[in-house]
Image (tube, rainbow, N blue to C red):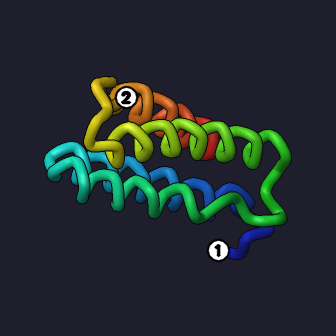
């Protein structure tokens, strides 16, 4: 299908990928999990995304940043916000499907 028929397809694929990656990262050591989550931060919304979809994507990226920072800091005493990351990603997927 073309992007014109399914404009949220890119976001749908990214949200599904993010959920899968979060599941894998949760069972990895902290350093590996931090690197995996950091990869989710890099890929932002496409220029043709609807503004509300792009805004949601950016808000999810902020949660990924928080998670990656906590995981990447060996001195952090904060628990990684896995549930928050999974919840916002699930919401993102629900919005774009």
Distance from disc 2 to disc 1, alpha carbons, whole Å, reads 36 Å
Q: Is residue 70 above or below residue 72?
A: above
Q: Secondary structure at mark 2?
A: loop
33 vs 48, left or right, is: left
At a point 68% along the width and 56% down the height, the residue shown is: 8
- In this rendered view, identify the residue nearer to me: 60 or 12: 60
Q: Which mark is residue 81?
A: 2
At a point 48% along the width and 57% down the height, the residue shown is: 40
Q: Secondary structure at mark 1?
A: loop
**Horizontal and vertical percent position of residue 69:** 44, 43
**Horizontal and vertical percent position of residue 10:** 62, 63
**Horizontal and vertical percent position of residue 57:** 65, 46
Tell which circle, 2 or 1, labels the residue nearer the N-terminal end: 1
59 vs 25, left or right, is: right
At a point 74% along the width and 65% down the height, the residue shown is: 46
56 vs 94, left or right, is: right
Q: Mark 1 sits on what residue?
A: 1
């Amino acid at each position: 299908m073309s992007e014109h028929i399914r404009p949220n397809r890119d976001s749908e694929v990214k949200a599904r990928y993010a959920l899968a990656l979060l599941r894998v990262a949760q069972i990895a050591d902290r350093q590996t999990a931090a690197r995996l989550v950091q990869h989710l931060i890099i890929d932002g919304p496409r220029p043709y995304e609807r503004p509300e979809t792009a805004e949601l994507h950016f808000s999810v990226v902020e949660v990924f940043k928080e998670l990656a920072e906590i995981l990447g800091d060996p001195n952090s005493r904060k628990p990684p916000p896995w549930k928050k990351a999974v919840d916002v990603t699930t919401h993102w997927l629900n919005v774009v499907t």
